[in-house]
Amino acid sequence: MNFLKYCFSIFYVLIAYLPVGAQADVRAELDSNYVETGNPFVVHIIVPQSAGKPGQIEFSAWENEIAEQNILQQTQWTPEGSFYKKDLTLVFFDADTLRLPPLPIHLNGQGLANTNPLEI
């Protein structure tokens, strides 16, 4: 009986350390494998509909890599199949490889979810 109590105690301790809400599978994808300096390109942001309708994107995560004026355009969130999609049109004038950190996205009523990092 003591062994059973011990197992349940361990189980409850492990459960306590699990996150309350699961991280939604939010993705950022490039429209091309090749980005040319000075030419606009598109980053697709994809959020599963099961996570709820996405809201504002926190671009401050990219402020050290991308100047605000280099975000040329962004579409509204649009439902497509089982996910929401938003396109960002960007331009770079630096020939170096950029590593963009994850972008936090507000999910209506469910906190934040982060995209994957991107290497351009």
Image (cartoon, helix red, strand yellow):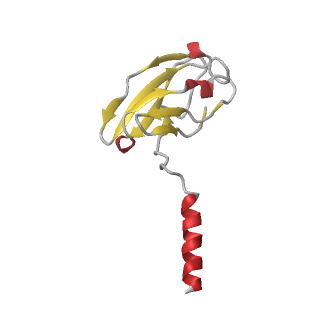
Instruction: Indicate left or right for 5 with 48 as reference.
Output: right
Residue 66, placed above or below residue 119: above
Instruction: Indicate left or right for 38 with 94 as reference.
Output: left
Residue 112 location, x and y as percent?
A: 50, 37
- In the rendered image, which quarter is residue 38 located in? top right
In this rendered view, identify the residue nearer to me: 16 or 99: 16
Instruction: Indicate left or right for 80 with 89 as reference.
Output: left
Residue drawn at (67%, 20%) of the image? 94
The quadrant of the rendering that contains the N terminus is bottom right
- In the rendered image, which quarter is residue 99 located in? top right
Residue drawn at (48%, 49%) of the image? 21
Residue 37, placed above or below residue 5: above
Name, please, the residue furthest toward the right.
96
User: How many callouts does the rendering have?
Assistant: 0
Residue 2, placed above or below residue 37: below
Residue 96 location, x and y as percent?
A: 69, 26
Residue 9 location, x and y as percent?
A: 58, 72
In this rendered view, identify the residue nearer to me: 43 or 36: 43
Residue 32 location, x and y as percent?
A: 50, 32
Residue drawn at (54%, 62%) of the image? 15
Name, please, the residue furthest toward the bottom.
1
The quadrant of the rendering that contains the C terminus is top right
